[in-house]
Image (cartoon, rainbow, N blue to C red):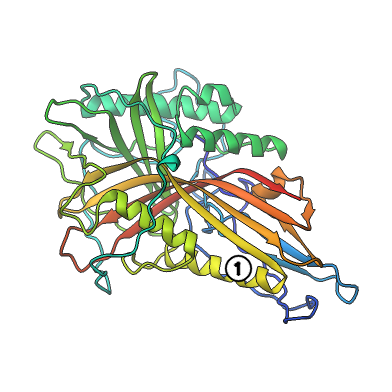
Amino acid sequence: MSRHASDPPDKRVWPSGHADTAAGSGFEDGEDWEPERLGTSGWRRLALAGVALAALGGAGAWAVASRSPESGAVLVNSTPAPDRSGWEAAVPPPAPDDTRQPSRRPPATAAGETEKTDPPAASAKPPEDSPVKPSPESSVTSPVDSRPSRLSVREARRVHERYARDLSMTQFSMDSRAMGKLEQGLALEMSRASFETARMQDAKVPAGPWPEPKVWVPRDTNGTTDWFLAVSHQPGVARVSKVLTRTSAGWRLTAFTADARNPPEPLPGIAADAEGYATSLPENASGLLATPRRIAEAHLASMESTTPDPIFADGPWTSEAVRFWQQERAQLERAGWRLSLSYLREGPVRSLMTRDGGALVWYGARSTDLREARRAGATVTLKGAAAVRTAGKSFARSASVTYGRMYAAYIPPAGSSERVRVLGEWSEVLESHGT
């Protein structure tokens, strides 16, 4: 699956400067304004020399240009678009008989091994009941059709190796049909969208080999499982997590996130039994600060309403993203435009128990940011992948961008003074339109 954010894969994504504007006046030249920079995991280019793809957290950028005769200045601002977490080296895939393990997402370690890092203490205790906006059932689409099976940690590694090898070759050829044999659901839609964007730019998506990951296989009382987790970390580049699910068609990647911060936020240790197997938790699991499903919905509700939720720790995919959207809305309103956001959860919420009694969770969403003109006089131009999809046109009445997004988060156990930490993201522009 291809992982690059809302801008070309060979570029870093950073907010553009834009001219500010006073109420009732045209945009003034020379006044640079820069929105909050989000350190998201949308790393687009990963050099073999180890150059990290820095990712900004955000979305497609937009520009508002004044049509007033007094000023031809342009207001440019980078929207918090999905900072895609796809960092791969831009190199040809290995030959079929190559024993390397090219993985779109990174490194590995021994089976059942856990990262021995303790989560940082939170600064504030979250409220017992944080407001949550439930997602309509219709938003939980793209079922994975899981099929339980008996899977050892060693076998899971082999499944991942095959996926990594085939992924590298599929990325290199940008074969959307072949990608259907590697991914499913929203992940597949996002990867195919990245291929389409690259083709429209006459570019390639990153591809190349990565070290083996650490693998955790959860199993139920029957000794079966329908998914497993692979986590890779390449220091100075990023840490990525991949969820592979057993479907009626075979093993498919269904979730992916990355944290390109240097160093990334520490992961809590994943609980494992004597045989190295992990424990999965249901979406309504108790004994946590809040259930996995509730946390996923609370996070998306916070983004949609651009209102910080105190149950979450500050970070690029929580407080900084909210602040970024608030600034976007303020700038658009001064230009005579209105901004509407929609975040709907999509797919299952996967969870693993941590050694401290908490949980690591992965969930996906489909988001749309819609800009509508309330008065004539200014136009909006999208940026990054969204601009590629609209051929760089400017719009006078409306402009919208829809993203696929995936997140990883840590939920502390009930009674903890820590807050929920969002530990990674992958986002991709699925479509963009304007009039």
Label 1 is placed on what type of residue? Answer: Arg
- Counting from the top left corner in percent of width and height, residue 188 is at 50, 32
- Counting from the top left corner in percent of width and height, residue 78 is at 63, 62
Q: Judge whether 42 appears above or below 130 on screen.
A: above
**Residue name at image x 32 percent, y 26 percent:** 146
Q: Is residue 423 left or right of residue 66?
A: left
Q: What element does badge 1 sit on?
A: helix
Task: Kindly tell me whether residue 39 is visible in this rendering.
Answer: no
The front one of 266 and 140 is: 140
**Residue name at image x 72 percent, y 71 percent:** 335
**Residue name at image x 20 percent, y 69 percent:** 417
The front one of 36 and 430 is: 430
Q: Which residue is most to the right?
A: 69
User: Label 1, on which residue?
Assistant: 329
Task: Kindly tell me whether residue 58 is visible in this rendering.
Answer: yes
- Counting from the top left corner in percent of width and height, residue 311 is at 31, 65
Q: Which residue is most to the left?
A: 274
Q: Is residue 316 left or right of residue 351?
A: right
